Image (cartoon, helix red, strand yellow):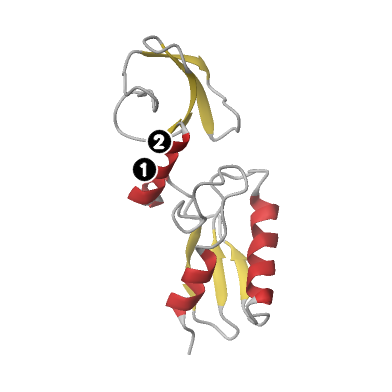
Amino acid sequence: MVDKKALLNLMAEIMDPEIPVVNIVELGIVRGIEETTPPNIIITPTYVGCPATDVISEMVREKLDAAGHSDVGIKNQLSPAWTTNWMSQAAHDKLRKYGIDPPCAHAPTCPRCGSGNTKLISAFGSTPCKSFHSCKDCLEPFDRFKCH
């Protein structure tokens, strides 16, 4: 029998390598635990071609091995594709506090001053999964996590 809760708690200790204030469970990268023999941690990258995919898999493997779970496998699953809907509210809150506008149904909002008076600078921000914006009120630049 797999202790899913213990494995998920272990995965929650792994911070995203590109956004070190959120963990891979909060981001929805960890899809779940497959109860096979041996069990598998199912992970889905935020987008196909994400440069952090291999790093995240290595971090998961290291964490599992260090905790005595060398028998647990890692399964990369691309379908269905990751969606920002899988991100927890905690991830949204942490992104905003870190200075990244989380993906939302509303127009881009400055995470520093809360203004909606912003402009798109580039469709690609510090990473391809984010866009780069500027606030017209406080004049601060910021990334916005793309909705998908």
Would you say the residues marked 1 and 2 are in contact, meaning their CB atoms lie under 8 Å apart? yes
The percent position of residue 88, horizontal first and vertical second, equals 37, 52
Q: Which residue is mark 1?
A: 93
Secondary structure of the residue carrying numbered label 1 = helix
* Residue 111's disc number: none
**Going 49% across and 23% down the picture, which residue do you hit?**
142
The percent position of residue 134, horizontal first and vertical second, equals 46, 15
Q: Is residue 67 left or right of residue 13?
A: right
Question: Taking 76 as reference, is 82 above or below it?
Answer: above
The percent position of residue 53, horizontal first and vertical second, equals 65, 51
Question: Taking 100 as reference, is 72 above or below it?
Answer: below
The percent position of residue 118, horizontal first and vertical second, equals 38, 14
Q: Quadrant of residue 61?
A: bottom right
**Going 43% across and 46% down the picture, which residue do you hit?**
83
**Going 53% across and 66% down the picture, which residue do you hit?**
11
Q: Which residue is mark 2?
A: 96
Say which quadrant the C terminus sits in: top left
Q: Quadrant of residue 59?
A: bottom right
Secondary structure of the residue carrying numbered label 2 = helix
For this orientation, the residue located farthest to the bottom is 1
Give, as a three-letter code, the residue at label 1. Asp
Give, as a three-letter code, the residue at label 2. Arg
Mark 1 nearby-residue class (10 Å; few <14, some 14–19, many ≥20):
some
Question: Taking 134 as reference, is 108 above or below it?
Answer: below
Q: Is residue 89 left or right of residue 39?
A: left
Q: How far apart are labels 1 and 2 at the CA level?
A: 5 Å
Is residue 102 something one can see in this rendering? no
Q: Please state which of residues 118 and 50 is positioned toward the viewer in this rendering.
A: 118
Mark 2 nearby-residue class (10 Å; few <14, some 14–19, many ≥20):
many
Q: Is residue 66 left or right of residue 106?
A: right
**Going 36% across and 43% down the picture, which residue do you hit?**
93
